[in-house]
Image (spheres, grey):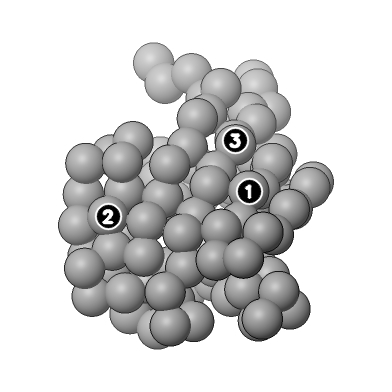
Amino acid sequence: MTDDVRATVRRLYAAFNAYDHGATKDIFTADFYSHPLGITGPESVTRSWQRFHEAFPDAQVVVEDMVVEGDTVAVRTSVRGVPGQEPTMLEMFRMRNGRIAELWGLSSLQRT
Protein backbone atom coordinates (compact mmCIF):
# COMPACT_ATOMS: atom_id res chain seq x y z
CA MET A 1 0.00 0.00 0.00
CA THR A 2 2.84 2.40 0.82
CA ASP A 3 4.19 2.20 -2.74
CA ASP A 4 0.73 2.87 -4.23
CA VAL A 5 0.20 5.88 -1.98
CA ARG A 6 3.65 7.22 -2.82
CA ALA A 7 3.01 6.69 -6.56
CA THR A 8 -0.27 8.64 -6.43
CA VAL A 9 1.36 11.63 -4.78
CA ARG A 10 4.27 11.54 -7.26
CA ARG A 11 1.67 11.45 -10.03
CA LEU A 12 0.09 14.58 -8.55
CA TYR A 13 3.34 16.55 -8.79
CA ALA A 14 4.16 15.14 -12.24
CA ALA A 15 0.74 16.24 -13.51
CA PHE A 16 1.17 19.71 -11.99
CA ASN A 17 4.63 20.10 -13.54
CA ALA A 18 3.35 18.92 -16.95
CA TYR A 19 0.36 21.32 -16.85
CA ASP A 20 -1.86 18.23 -17.07
CA HIS A 21 -4.82 19.91 -15.39
CA GLY A 22 -7.21 17.20 -16.57
CA ALA A 23 -5.39 14.61 -14.46
CA THR A 24 -6.97 16.01 -11.30
CA LYS A 25 -10.13 13.96 -11.91
CA ASP A 26 -8.06 10.76 -11.68
CA ILE A 27 -5.88 11.87 -8.75
CA PHE A 28 -8.43 13.43 -6.37
CA THR A 29 -11.66 11.98 -4.98
CA ALA A 30 -14.94 13.56 -6.10
CA ASP A 31 -15.38 15.02 -2.60
CA PHE A 32 -11.73 16.07 -2.16
CA TYR A 33 -11.28 18.92 0.36
CA SER A 34 -8.35 21.34 0.63
CA HIS A 35 -8.19 22.76 4.15
CA PRO A 36 -5.81 25.64 3.30
CA LEU A 37 -7.82 26.82 0.29
CA GLY A 38 -11.29 25.82 1.48
CA ILE A 39 -12.08 24.24 -1.89
CA THR A 40 -13.84 20.99 -2.76
CA GLY A 41 -13.56 18.60 -5.69
CA PRO A 42 -11.07 17.98 -8.49
CA GLU A 43 -12.44 20.85 -10.60
CA SER A 44 -11.47 23.32 -7.89
CA VAL A 45 -7.92 21.92 -7.96
CA THR A 46 -7.86 22.33 -11.75
CA ARG A 47 -8.85 26.00 -11.42
CA SER A 48 -6.27 26.55 -8.68
CA TRP A 49 -3.51 24.96 -10.78
CA GLN A 50 -4.53 27.05 -13.80
CA ARG A 51 -4.35 30.30 -11.79
CA PHE A 52 -0.97 29.31 -10.36
CA HIS A 53 0.42 28.46 -13.80
CA GLU A 54 -0.87 31.75 -15.20
CA ALA A 55 0.90 33.65 -12.43
CA PHE A 56 4.10 31.55 -12.56
CA PRO A 57 4.40 29.88 -16.00
CA ASP A 58 7.89 28.47 -15.28
CA ALA A 59 7.03 26.96 -11.88
CA GLN A 60 8.04 23.37 -11.17
CA VAL A 61 7.50 21.53 -7.89
CA VAL A 62 10.40 19.34 -6.71
CA VAL A 63 9.78 16.70 -4.03
CA GLU A 64 12.48 16.95 -1.38
CA ASP A 65 11.09 14.53 1.24
CA MET A 66 8.10 12.20 1.45
CA VAL A 67 6.92 10.19 4.45
CA VAL A 68 4.08 7.67 4.19
CA GLU A 69 2.24 6.26 7.19
CA GLY A 70 -0.84 4.20 6.36
CA ASP A 71 -3.20 6.37 4.32
CA THR A 72 -1.38 9.61 5.16
CA VAL A 73 1.47 11.23 3.22
CA ALA A 74 3.62 14.18 4.32
CA VAL A 75 5.65 15.94 1.62
CA ARG A 76 8.21 18.76 1.69
CA THR A 77 8.72 20.39 -1.68
CA SER A 78 10.57 23.29 -3.30
CA VAL A 79 8.95 25.39 -5.99
CA ARG A 80 11.35 26.46 -8.69
CA GLY A 81 10.66 29.08 -11.35
CA VAL A 82 9.01 31.67 -9.10
CA PRO A 83 10.79 34.99 -9.74
CA GLY A 84 12.81 36.27 -6.79
CA GLN A 85 12.11 33.36 -4.48
CA GLU A 86 12.22 29.59 -4.09
CA PRO A 87 9.24 28.81 -1.90
CA THR A 88 8.90 25.63 0.09
CA MET A 89 5.70 23.78 0.84
CA LEU A 90 4.75 21.28 3.50
CA GLU A 91 1.70 19.29 2.49
CA MET A 92 -0.12 16.42 4.14
CA PHE A 93 -2.52 14.26 2.17
CA ARG A 94 -5.08 11.71 3.31
CA MET A 95 -5.73 9.00 0.76
CA ARG A 96 -8.91 7.03 0.11
CA ASN A 97 -9.28 4.22 -2.44
CA GLY A 98 -6.08 5.20 -4.25
CA ARG A 99 -6.95 8.90 -4.58
CA ILE A 100 -6.25 12.03 -2.57
CA ALA A 101 -9.24 12.86 -0.35
CA GLU A 102 -7.89 15.67 1.85
CA LEU A 103 -5.04 18.18 1.92
CA TRP A 104 -3.49 20.28 4.66
CA GLY A 105 -0.56 22.51 3.82
CA LEU A 106 1.73 25.44 4.47
CA SER A 107 3.69 27.46 1.94
CA SER A 108 6.37 30.13 2.13
CA LEU A 109 5.23 31.59 -1.23
CA GLN A 110 4.94 35.35 -1.01
CA ARG A 111 2.39 36.79 -3.42
CA THR A 112 2.44 40.45 -4.26
The residue where tag 1 is placed is: 74
Task: Please name which of the two marks, 3 or 2, marks the residue nearer to the observer.
Answer: 2
Residue farthest along the right direction in this orientation: 64
**Residue pictured at 53% horizontal, 47% vertical:** 92
Earlier residue among tags 3 and 2 = 2
Q: Which amino acid type corresponds to the residue marked 3 in the rendered image?
A: Met
Is 50 left or right of 82, judged from the image as shown? left
Mark 3 secondary-structure assignment: strand
Q: Nearer the viewer, residue 90 or 71?
A: 71
Q: Which mark is residue 94?
A: none
Q: Residues within 10 Å of mark 1 (few under 14, many from 20)?
A: some
Query: Does 78 appear above or below 39?
Result: above
* Picture coordinates of residue 42, whole percent (x, y): 28, 68
Dividing the picture into quadrants, the one containing residue 68 is bottom right
Dividing the picture into quadrants, the one containing residue 83 is top right
Q: Nearer the viewer, residue 42 or 82?
A: 42
Mark 1 secondary-structure assignment: strand
**Residue pictured at 50% horizontal, 55% vertical:** 93
The residue where tag 2 is placed is: 33
Is 96 left or right of 34, judged from the image as shown? right
Task: Please name which of the two marks, 3 or 1, marks the residue nearer to the observer.
Answer: 1
Query: Does 49 appear above or below 11?
Result: above
Earlier residue among tags 3 and 1 = 1
**Residue pictured at 46% horizontal, 59% vertical:** 94
The residue where tag 3 is placed is: 89
Is 59 left or right of 42, judged from the image as shown? right
Q: Which amino acid type corresponds to the residue marked 2 in the rendered image?
A: Tyr
